[in-house]
Image (tube, helix red, strand yellow):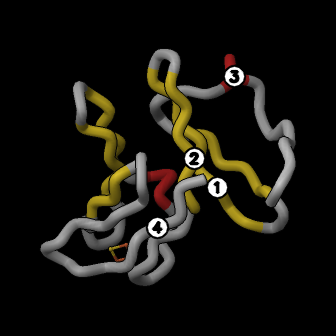
Amino acid sequence: MDSWMEVALLEALTGKGHSVAIDGQKVLLLRAADQVFAIGNQCTHQGAAFGKGVVRIAGSVRTVTCPAHGSIFNLQDGQGDAATGHEAGSCL
Ligand code: FES
């Protein structure tokens, strides 16, 4: 993707997540104060949607925990936790 696309109003975004489709890809948008995070809304392990996962945005911690098996993904770079070795998610 090499251009900007309006997908949601900033006011509609919260820390609980807002799911959208961008070019056919499911994306979870999250907002914490003046920061917005976007991550592919499908776990790289077995494809569970992150929308029902636990989001932690406090201090330097910015993660979403997969609701299916508990893998933790960094919202800033998509990296998964080292304990499970699951591939990184896609942060946009
Ligand atoms: S589907 Fe996400 S950890 Fe298994």
Instruction: Name the residue tied to disc 2.
Output: 38
Q: Is residue 2 left or right of residue 92?
A: right
Q: Residue at x 73, y 66 (%)?
A: 25
Q: Mark 4 or 3 closer to N-term?
A: 3
Residue 48 vertical position relative to residue 77 in the rendered view, above or below: below
Name the one closer to the observer, 31 or 35: 35
Label 4 SS:
loop
Q: Mark 1 or 2 closer to N-term?
A: 1
Q: Is residue 80 left or right of residue 90?
A: left
Query: Where's residue 73, x and y in %?
Result: 34, 59
Q: Residue at x 44, y 52 (%)?
A: 52
Instruction: Name the residue tied to disc 3.
Output: 10
Label 3 SS:
helix
Query: Where's residue 57, x and y in %?
Result: 32, 32
Eye-nearest disc, 1 or 4: 4
Label 1 SS:
strand
Instruction: Name the residue tied to disc 1.
Output: 27
Instruction: Name the residue tied to disc 4.
Output: 89
Q: Residue at x 77, y 33 (%)?
A: 8
**Gap in Å between the C-alphas at discs 3 and 1?**
15 Å
Q: Mark 1 or 4 closer to N-term?
A: 1
Residue 36 picture quarter? top right
